[in-house]
Image (cartoon, helix red, strand yellow):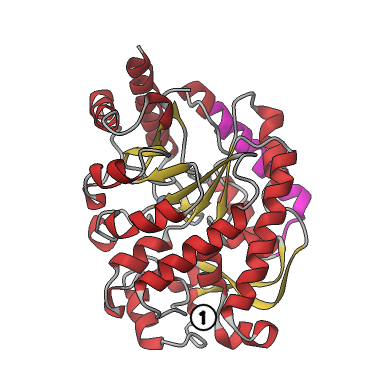
Amino acid sequence: MTFSVTQIGSWPRSERLLAALREKRMDRIAQAEFDQIADAEIVRCLQLQHEAGVDMVVDGELRRDNFYSFITDKVEGTKLMSLAEMLDTVEDKAAFEAMLQTLDAPAFAIRNPTCVGKLRRKEPLVVNDLRFVKRHSDKPVKVTLPGPYLLTRAMWVTAHSFAAYGDKPVMADDVVTILREELADLVSEGVECVQFDEPVLTEVVHSGDSKRRTFMCATLAVRRDTSSELAYAAELMNRVVAGFEDKLRTGIHVCRGNWSRREDVLITGDYQPLVECFKGMRLKHYALEYATPRAGELDVIGRALGDREIGLGCVNPRTDEAESVESIQERAQEALQYWKPEQISLNPDCGFGCFANRCVNEEAAAVGKLRAMAEAARRLRG
Ligand SMILES: [Zn+2]
């Protein structure tokens, strides 16, 4: 399909769902009761996408606390720890404290899946979510998974993880295994697209010294040089997707953070330092930010990745006003210099939800932006 309209992943949570997520975290409601509430919200989210004219649907990540922490429910050997709890055990306390100050949310409100034992997939990560969406939508479905590099960076906290693994790369082997098990199941369920979220890659190349690190660097358990980190990220990704390349559309989403509406605290810098890493990844689809000027010019990626598909970020998920249809069309016209229409999808720069308890946008604004993209796609096809 040409100019396929889709989302990145997360959708704003309603008050009811937020309350249910809170209750679930505190073990105060049964899973079945939570599912009933989440199911209804996801059906509604799908309806809104259908009405807005979205071509490939997502479930809005509405069962998740955030885009990666949910795996603690599914993977043995993990524990959800708030950033405040982690402060005692991270290696670089000063940097971690500086990072916490860049947040405009309290440190107890953001939770990280920390490795505290041998990792093993005790239930599917997203396969059941995919099945649910397929029962309620006849559109192609995209599922989102945290990428292997993000998971490895986030989960390894030496004080908690050392006893089980001794070293981070050994833990990473199990992260790769878990994601491969998931991909195998997703293929047999007939998933159309799997997107790995690796927002931490912009932190690797653009955050500079530790004072400017953001919470996206997760546990800060890294300080190799940039090129080794990027090569490692590409290697992990390729190990995950090896053998699946022809079985499904695999993609990656990389943005500059989506935890605040304040543009000045989000990361700035183009994709140039990531071009080699992207090219080295055996992926089809690259869902990237281009609505924000912080992401630089499109030709950086256009010249390098013309043989792949671009998920063109063309609306800002963090503003109230929908972008004009004309401005989205213009952005897509620019992309046509580098890609054929069937290689171009339209999406927001990132999710509309991000962290459950502080979504970056409201439902009405998100719907407006989906509609604008769908209308732009209609005109572009015409
Ligand atoms: Zn993002």
**Rendering quarter of residue 162:** bottom right
The correct choice, above or below, for 159 with respect to 103 in the image is below
Residue nearest the observer in this picture, 86 or 12: 86
- Residue 279 x/y as whole percent: 41, 51
The correct choice, above or below, for 139 with respect to 269 in the image is above
**Rendering quarter of residue 168:** bottom right
Q: Is residue 351 left or right of residue 329?
A: right
**Rendering quarter of residue 344:** top left
Q: Is residue 331 left or right of residue 105?
A: left
In the image, is residue 153 part of the stretch drawn in magenta?
no
- Residue 210 x/y as whole percent: 31, 79
Q: Is mark 1 within 8 Å of ligand 1?
A: no
Most prominent secondary structure in the magenta stretch?
Answer: helix
Residue nearest the observer in this picture, 88 or 159: 159
In the image, is residue 36 part of the stretch drawn in magenta?
yes
- Residue 256 x/y as whole percent: 34, 56
Q: Residue at 28% of width from left, 42% of height from top?
A: 303
- Residue 40 x/y as whole percent: 65, 36
Q: Residues within 10 Å of mark 1 (few under 14, many from 20)?
A: many
Residues drawn in magenta:
27-48
Farthest residue, direction top: 382
Q: Is residue 141 left or right of residue 222?
A: right
Q: At label 1, which amino acid type do we have?
A: Met
Q: Which residue is mark 1?
A: 86
